[in-house]
Image (cartoon, helix red, strand yellow):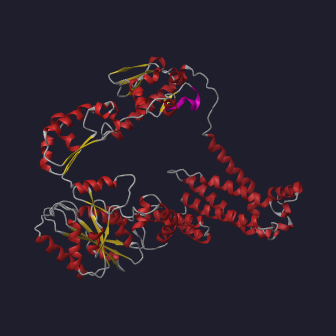
Amino acid sequence: MADELGQSPKNWTETQVIFLLTSPVEKPLLHTFYEFFTDMEGHEDIICICESESNFLKWQSFAEGSCGTETVNNFSVVGMKMSHVNATVQNVQPVKACTSKHLPVFVKGICQLETNKEEEMASLEILTLNHCDETTEHFISEEKDNMEQQFLRGGRVTWLNFWLAEHKHVGEVIERDAYKDVSELLKNALKYNAEQTPVKSISIYHHPGSGGSTVARQVLWKNRKDLRCAVVKPSYSAAVVAQHAVDLREYEEKDPQSCLPVLLLIEDSDKEYLDDLRNELEVAINSKQIQYGIPCFIFLSCSRSYDPERRCKESPLQNVSVTHKLSAEEKRMFAGKRKQLARLHYKYEMFEEAEHWADTAARQLPNNSHILDTKGQVYKKWFQAKRKAIDNDSEPNTAKSTADAVKTALKAMQCFQDCERAAAADTESINNSGYFAEAEVGCDLLKLIFSLQFFANGARGHGECLKYLCSGHIPEELKDDWEPFHGCLKKLYKTVDDALEWISGDLSYFQTDTGVEDKDTNIEREKKYEVVQSAVQHMEKGYRTKMKDNTPRMRRLYTHFFLGSGNGLDKFIHKRKVDGLLKGTSLSEKRMKWLSGEVWKKPEIAKMLKRVSGWTDDGVVYLEGPQKQKLRYEHNCGSSAVC
């Protein structure tokens, strides 16, 4: 088998073998499976796909003799229609020739939603699993900021807002407390219950403009991969909507008894309409004699109310309220959004609006260093824009023409100082941006001051400028126009000096000795050994914790760097550099040289790498540390593992 494929079984680390069982299983196919299983040293790279459960049973009984029931079941897809398999495989491809609309199916795969079938369910706005995936990169780059601004300023949420946030093109959509409450009610509604009703209801009552519709659509968006979700369009009768909802539930499913629940968003409808729709659906379900342990349909009713909290208290296990009043956590999240909105505005030089949103965010969280930094960034960008306009003006710079820019720069520096104080008081996070920004604005402000016509007259002018900044002297040319700024400008040199001194101290932590290394004493070697030993133990523990539930194939370790014989950072040799010395060989030949250990025999490679003393024992590598101590490194040792 391996000969026919033209490669050694040891090179099958990236091969996936699929057995597609479309007819009753015969012995030749079973023997073929056994050969693959033997040569590939296990089942982890072999997948069985079978639509017929009866065909699979014979396959299972044979395969169990080699690898056990659990292994066979974990690597088999059984009972899924081939059209669902095809749609699922196409959906996970990194590049799609064209975007089809997909829906989840009961057996955990997906199916394709045909356009004509979607049009037949005209009363429903169906939310597909891959909604908005057809969005082009050009549209994203051109429109994403505009769409985010509209939404953050109170515009109605769209599916594209959620899609852009999910794909990290814009900031995340805030999950309000009400979203979590609705999600919990939905989770409880989906639990199996022998006395379950076919139709369940969850109601959201919200103040107008408080975000109730956003919460409801967010629930649909987050559940679109596990439920069939749709928004009921207005102006359709309950009978029509019920028929389309039943069609959506059963679309491309093999058995009406085994279908995913349908989550229907119904907005601003009265109780009579909801009751009529419920009755129509219950009649349809009962007429099909469907046995249900979980609901077939779930209504998510979203309605405006001027007293949503009262409506919530009437039925707390079914109703959720959304109001303009924010919890402490919601205030923190919305302040972050106002900060984000401020950044969007100053990005497009809409500085007045950016200032408004930054002020609003700072009032909500006056001690948040990141929000104070954003407020400072607004004034910094504004100052830079004013400086650019001044530089482009052919008129000489005067105290009067620069007063507005100086005022903005001082506002920016004050915000950054507030940011520094807030960051120093925050014990949970580190934010050093204030010092860097303050120093940058301070230096730019000094350049602007020195550019004044009065100070631009060679050495004499510069001396006059230093006299103004470093003493109590105030030139007549500046006295009136800069009257509000003299006190701050007199301290400017000290302010910038303090910021630069802090930056210098902070950067000193990262300075390293890049000279030739001195030989360590025995005590120093002992200390370094203890650090390395502790690091290796923590790495092994973290690796086991993270990878314990993965298959052996997923747990494999790949070497990217080797220990070299150089000093400093030259000790680290990337694998690509080693591969570069294996010239004139094909990819498969290179793999064989790595597997056989032949790589280590090449003189130029042996010279490049550092040789260490050690031994192996029962699949564990031991390196010799100081004083003959053992450095234990657990690794599955093959011929390529040790040189």
Q: Nearer the viewer, residue 30 or 301?
A: 30
- In percent of width and height, residue 558 lies at 41, 34
The stretch drawn in magenta includes residue 247? no
> Which of the 4 quarters of the picture holds residue 86?
bottom left
Q: Residue at x 41, y 29 (%)?
A: 589
Q: Is residue 523 left or right of residue 88?
A: right
Range shown magenta: 566-574
Determine whether, in the image, residue 251 is placed left or right of residue 406. left
Occupied quadrant, residue 19? top left
Vertical comparison of 248 with 573: above or below: below
Left or right: 45 with respect to 561? left
Q: Residue placed at 15% from the left, 46% from the top?
A: 56
* Front residue of this view, candidates 79 and 557: 79
Which residue, as the protein is rendered here, is positioned at the far top?
628
Q: Is residue 501 visible?
A: yes
Decide which of 148, 125 is in the foreground and name it. Answer: 125
Considering the image in quadrants, where does the C terminus appear?
A: top left
Q: How many marks?
A: 0
Residue 568 is inside the magenta segment: yes
Q: Position of residue 40 (x, y in %)?
A: 27, 33
Q: Is residue 268 above or below residue 501?
A: below
Q: Residue 319, how many percent across, how many down?
A: 28, 71
In what quadrant of the picture does the N terminus appear? top left
- Please name the residue shown 12% across and 66% down the image: 290
Expressed as whole percent of the image width and height from the top left, the position of residue 546 reads: 36, 41
Furthest residue to the right?
A: 460
Task: Please name whichever residue, 327 or 262, is drawn nearer the observer in this view of the structure.
Answer: 262
Residue 327 visible to an observer of this rendering: no
